[in-house]
């Protein structure tokens, strides 16, 4: 599918499969080399577009394929089938150019934990060619805006709480002014106040910098508050894609009473949040 | 400016690694202490046989110390980042892989030189080594030439943890061990069995040690060592692009199989 300029992201028929080693079964003859492997279909034929400046949420239970999809979009995984275009550029063929446009906050704080927030941010700034003076000013601004005490910027990351580390991860991603921001469960583990700070900041960034945001989350309220459209992913496939209001309205019409987004999720997946997909 | 951008990013790795050295200072002191003790014990073995042997063995210990730092820092760069949990962040940075690995190599050369200089100072103090006959400039140039070859080998070793998160790191140690065995670090390669001597021919460390000993023990000039140095440069010029090519293949494999993310 040809990408039009309005589209920040176009995913077309994306599929990804991994192979997992099977456990040894007593009594079953072992192979000489390696173990048997079985395929795991992490993402199955996913197609969607995200418009420039939109916040798009991907909801799904654990193991449903959200992070695999984010990794494919972030150029860290090759899809087996299908294509992903970011502002018209193929993520497989134009990796370097795509990487200049994106940044990602992952659910795990990916930092050198012995280094301070400042040292980690300066490392990121140099990789993304942000001038050190500019990086110093911007990172302080962002961190203060997120309620991060400036005094803590020079202490090793391992001495910071998970919430603090996640705020530094958000600051690091925004420091590079990405036009497409990939947020993989960015508020998981944050206290309510920090969560609100991060959510408010995401909205501000999207409005002031025209940034497109792809968000995966477990938090229904967060998805409803932040995104314009959302997709629900189950066993690697999108089972719904619409605005939160439309998704709720469809189920309300069917059930005859008002429903929440959680009801929609349960209806479509038949699973609770914490169940493994 | 594409080149300027990449050079600035190269510096990111050098700065980051020196910051890490500073933060892991206790570990660094322990490693340095061990390197010094290792060089001294090997030197003392030489004392039992004669002063020439002391120099022969300490030159071997110092050179091997330098080359192993180089090999280790480049070869273990993927394992280290995987352990820290930063591998995906580094791999999705908008820089060329040459920039990433080049930064690691520059750090390894500076760091290896500093460590080797400290060990050399202590060893010289203990054994009253006289370098009157030595041609230090030739020795230094041999080190520079051999760095290229070891960077190439390091790049090839760095791919192993990408191919196998669980066993790749151990495989780099096997490679390093084989180089130690066959290259004549503490003995002449002629004492090796014939089939192992064949391996010493393809090890760049064999030529490095031979040339460095000729410079430091016999004071041979750059002109006299020219053929050995040229051989090392040619090996380096073959191994570096080959190492990068293999690393790129490994990276593509890891991105297809999803092995980048796994913590081995």
Image (cartoon, rainbow, N blue to C red):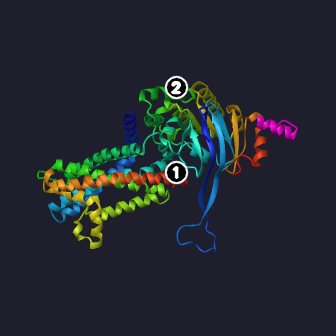
Q: Which residue is mark 2?
A: A141
Residue B262 position, x and y percent, is 54, 53
Residue that appears at 81% across and 38% down: A250
Residue at left offset 44%, top offset 37%:
A127
User: Could you say where residue A87 lies in the image, as x and y percent from the top left?
Assistant: 56, 35
User: Residue under circle 1?
Assistant: B255
In this rendered view, identify the residue nearer to me: A89 or A130: A89
Residue B208 seen in this snapshot: yes
**What secondary structure is found at the residue carrying circle 2?**
helix
Name the side, left or right, on which A71 lies relative to A246. Answer: left
Question: Which range is magenta?
Answer: A246-259
Q: Secondary structure at mark 1?
A: helix
Q: Give how far across and how far down residue B89 sits, in percent.
A: 50, 43
The residue carrying pointer 2 sits among few (fewer than 14), some (14 to 19) or many (20 or more) residues within 10 Å by Cα, namely some
- Up the image or down, A37 lies above or below B16; here it is below
The residues bearing labels 1 and 2 have C-alpha atoms spaced at a distance of: 35 Å
From the viewer's perspective, tell me whether residue B111 is left or right of residue A41: left
- Kindly report the secondary structure that dominates the magenta region of the rendered protein: helix
* Furthest-left residue in this view: B133
Which of A30/B125 is in front? A30
What chain does badge 2 belong to? A
């Amino acid at each position: 599918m040809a990408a039009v300029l309005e589209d920040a992201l176009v995913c077309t028929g994306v599929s990804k499969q991994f192979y997992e080693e099977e456990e040894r079964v007593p009594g079953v003859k072992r192979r000489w080399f390696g173990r048997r492997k079985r395929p795991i279909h992490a993402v199955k034929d996913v197609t969607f577009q995200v418009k420039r400046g939109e916040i798009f949420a991907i909801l799904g239970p654990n193991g449903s394929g959200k992070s695999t999809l984010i990794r494919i979009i972030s150029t860290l995984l090759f899809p087996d089938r299908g294509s992903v275009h970011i502002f018209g550029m193929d993520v497989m063929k134009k990796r370097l150019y795509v990487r200049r446009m994106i940044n990602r906050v992952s659910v795990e704080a990916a930092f050198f934990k012995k280094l301070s927030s400042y040292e980690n941010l300066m490392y990121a700034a140099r990789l993304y060619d942000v001038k050190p003076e500019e990086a110093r000013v911007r990172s302080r601004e962002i961190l203060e805006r997120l309620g991060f005490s400036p005094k803590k910027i020079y202490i090793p990351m391992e001495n910071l709480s998970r919430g603090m580390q996640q705020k530094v991860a958000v600051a690091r991603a925004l420091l590079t002014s990405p036009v497409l921001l990939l947020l993989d469960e960015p508020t998981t583990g944050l206290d309510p106040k920090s969560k609100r700070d991060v959510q408010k900041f995401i909205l501000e960034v999207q409005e002031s910098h025209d940034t497109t945001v792809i968000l995966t989350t477990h938090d229904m309220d967060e998805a409803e508050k932040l995104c314009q459209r959302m997709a629900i992913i189950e066993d690697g496939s999108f089972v719904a894609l619409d605005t939160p209001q439309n998704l709720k309205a469809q189920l309300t019409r069917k059930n005859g009473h008002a429903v929440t987004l959680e009801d929609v999720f349960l209806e479509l997946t038949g699973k609770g949040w914490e169940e493994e997909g | 400016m594409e080149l300027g951008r990449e050079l600035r990013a190269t510096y990111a790795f050098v700065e980051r690694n020196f910051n890490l050295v500073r933060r892991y200072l206790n570990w660094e002191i322990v490693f340095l202490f061990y390197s010094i003790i290792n060089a001294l014990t090997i030197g003392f073995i030489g004392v039992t046989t004669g002063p020439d042997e002391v120099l022969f063995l300490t030159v071997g210990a110092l050179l091997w110390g330098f080359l192993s730092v180089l090999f280790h820092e480049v070869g273990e760069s993927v394992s280290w980042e995987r352990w820290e949990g930063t591998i995906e962040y580094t791999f999705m940075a908008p820089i060329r892989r040459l920039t990433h690995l080049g930064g690691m190599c520059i750090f390894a050369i500076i760091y290896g030189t500093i460590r080797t200089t400290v060990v050399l100072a202590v060893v010289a103090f203990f054994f009253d080594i006289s370098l009157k006959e030595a041609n230090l400039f030739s020795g230094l140039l041999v080190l520079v030439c051999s760095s290229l070859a070891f960077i190439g080998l390091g790049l090839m070793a760095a791919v192993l943890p990408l191919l196998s998160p669980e066993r790749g790191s151990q495989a780099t140690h096997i490679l390093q061990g084989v180089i130690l065995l066959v290259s004549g670090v503490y003995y002449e390669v002629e004492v090796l069995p014939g089939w192992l001597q064949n391996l010493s021919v393809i090890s760049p460390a064999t030529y490095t040690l031979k040339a460095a000993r000729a410079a430091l023990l016999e004071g041979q000039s750059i002109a006299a060592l020219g053929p050995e140095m040229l051989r090392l440069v040619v090996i380096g010029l073959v191994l570096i692009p080959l190492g990068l090519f293999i690393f790129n293949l490994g990276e593509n494999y890891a991105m297809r199989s999803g092995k980048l993310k796994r913590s081995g």
